[in-house]
């Protein structure tokens, strides 16, 4: 591809559109240059892979000829030349990342704190990469690597980036960029301000006064489950549809993983929003009700809807595509006023870890916390039964908009719809 084509593809990656990759692609190149030097030093010293998950990925690539074919192809196709563009180099890069916490950069254009997305950026732009990241075995092995990294980010060892130094997550630039004044900080007098891990910082709690609950006594008021921006509002959703194509690719049977409640949502509505890296990453109940079922559906982590072709609407096709294929949670809440509602948190990039804190039978008040995302990119879909919603009180981006990812902002506990 030409340099202009590479930049265009980069700007259409969902991780870029969601703000998880740097605004300037040169920051990715700089990151890959630095990572290549680290990998070269590791290989020169003949360092062995430390991570059990990365060693398992190595074994999969060696033993599964189809996986090795796709991976070899995706590493040979990028024009960028780095030591990481070999199987051994990629494995050593992942081995380094799983014991490294994301770094902060005070320059927003150069902020590059999603290292796995950066590592895979050019690989995902290739036909081999598109195939590899949709391969069940390869995807499953990558998931285990990310789970291992999540465990590291849950540990005290990850706190070294939680400092007030200029490149720390508690610095004045980071404080302003992430609006930390809105969040609960355990104890600023303690090291790392009392956060026990990097992930604890990432899914930190927000002060209730900054997210007041709309219509607390009006059961017809439906509130946002999360902070984010509106991606799409679709009505009359089909049970099964071609979710990988342009248009309206919501497919209930795939979104809900064939659950017994699928038929109750046919003809209903989907409200989707996505979260930036700086957003509040806990999510709450949009209605009062009883939890009927809650589960995690394992799926893809790094996959764009490239089969849809060029995406002039800034990756909205991928946003909708990911409701059917990505790792996601399903929390079904039965409301006396709104009927059955499915809250679907979706992992997009990096760890893609969804944690659900409620279980079947729990009685919830609107605004109650349901769970949180660990480090990484994320999206949220709310699914309503046919006829449950009278009208939505927020708007999706205009049809054909070139800035679909810059939809109307929504905030957890704020009104988004009114039930009939």
Image (cartoon, rainbow, N blue to C red):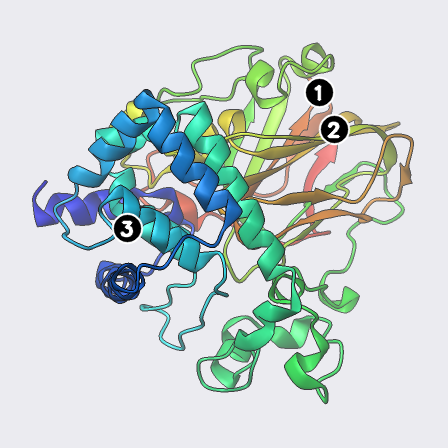
Q: Hey, which residue is sitting farthest left in the picture?
A: 2
Q: Label 3 belongs to which residue? A: 89
Label 2: which secondary element: strand
Q: Earlier in the sequence, mark 3 or mark 2?
A: 3
Q: Quadrant of residue 93?
A: bottom left
- x%, y% of residue 403? 35, 46
**Which label sits on residue 213?**
none
Residue visible at 65% across and 49% down? 226
Label 1: which secondary element: loop
Callouts 1 and 2 close, C-beta under 8 Å: yes
For the N terminus, the quadrant is top left
Q: Nearer the viewer, residue 394 or 255?
A: 255
Q: Label 1 belongs to which residue? A: 385
**Which label sits on residue 341?**
2
Q: Hey, which residue is sitting farthest front in the picture?
A: 46
Callouts 3 and 1 close, C-beta under 8 Å: no
- CA neighbours of label 2 inside 10 A, class few (<14), some (14 to 19), many (20+): many
Q: Earlier in the sequence, mark 3 or mark 1?
A: 3
Residue visible at 60% across and 69% down? 157
Residue 276 visible in the picture: yes
Q: Give the distance between the C-alpha atoms of the residues marked 1 and 2, in whole angstroms.
A: 7 Å
Q: Is residue 32 above or below residue 244?
A: below
- x%, y% of residue 127? 23, 29
Q: Nearer the viewer, mark 3 or mark 2?
A: 3
Q: Nearer the viewer, mark 1 or mark 2?
A: 2
For the C terminus, the quadrant is top right
- x%, y% of residue 262? 68, 14
């Amino acid at each position: 591809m030409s340099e202009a084509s590479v930049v265009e593809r980069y700007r259409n990656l969902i991780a870029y559109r969601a703000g998880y990759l740097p605004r300037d692609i040169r920051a990715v190149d700089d990151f890959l240059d630095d990572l290549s030097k680290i990998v070269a030093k590791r290989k020169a010293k003949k360092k062995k892979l430390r991570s059990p998950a990365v060693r398992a990925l190595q074994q999969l690539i060696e033993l599964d000829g189809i996986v090795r074919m796709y991976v070899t192809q995706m590493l040979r196709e990028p024009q960028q030349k780095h030591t990481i563009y070999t199987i051994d180099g990629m494995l050593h890069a992942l081995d380094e990342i799983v014991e490294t916490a994301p770094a902060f950069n005070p320059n927003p254009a150069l902020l590059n704190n999603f290292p796995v997305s950066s590592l895979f950026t050019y690989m995902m732009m290739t036909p081999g990469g598109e195939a590899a990241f949709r391969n069940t075995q390869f995807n499953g092995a990558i998931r285990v690597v990310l789970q291992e990294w999540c465990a590291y980010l849950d540990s005290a060892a990850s706190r070294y980036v939680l400092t007030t130094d200029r490149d720390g997550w508690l610095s004045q630039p980071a404080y302003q960029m992430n609006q930390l004044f809105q969040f609960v900080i355990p104890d600023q007098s303690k090291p790392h301000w009392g956060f026990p891990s990097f992930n604890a910082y990432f899914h930190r709690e927000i002060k209730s006064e900054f997210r007041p609950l709309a219509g607390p006594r009006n059961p017809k008021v439906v509130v946002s489950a999360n902070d984010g921006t509106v991606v799409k509002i679709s009505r009359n959703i089909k049970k099964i549809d071609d979710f990988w194509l342009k248009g309206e690719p919501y497919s209930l049977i795939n979104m809900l993983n064939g659950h017994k409640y699928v038929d109750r949502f046919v003809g209903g509505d989907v409200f989707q929003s996505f979260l930036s890296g700086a957003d509040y990453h806990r999510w709450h109940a949009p209605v009062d009700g009883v939890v009927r079922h809650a589960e995690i559906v394992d799926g893809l982590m790094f996959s764009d809807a490239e089969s849809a072709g060029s995406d002039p609407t800034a990756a909205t096709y991928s946003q909708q595509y990911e409701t059917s294929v990505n790792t996601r949670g399903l929390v079904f809440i039965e409301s006396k006023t709104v009927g059955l509602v499915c809250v679907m948190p979706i992992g997009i990039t990096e760890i893609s870890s969804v944690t659900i804190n409620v279980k079947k039978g729990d009685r919830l008040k609107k605004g109650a916390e349901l769970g949180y995302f660990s480090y990484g990119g994320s999206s949220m879909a709310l699914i309503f039964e046919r006829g449950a919603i009278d009208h939505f009180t927020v708007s999706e981006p205009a049809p054909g908009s070139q800035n679909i990812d810059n939809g109307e902002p929504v905030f957890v506990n704020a009104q988004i719809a009114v039930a009939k």
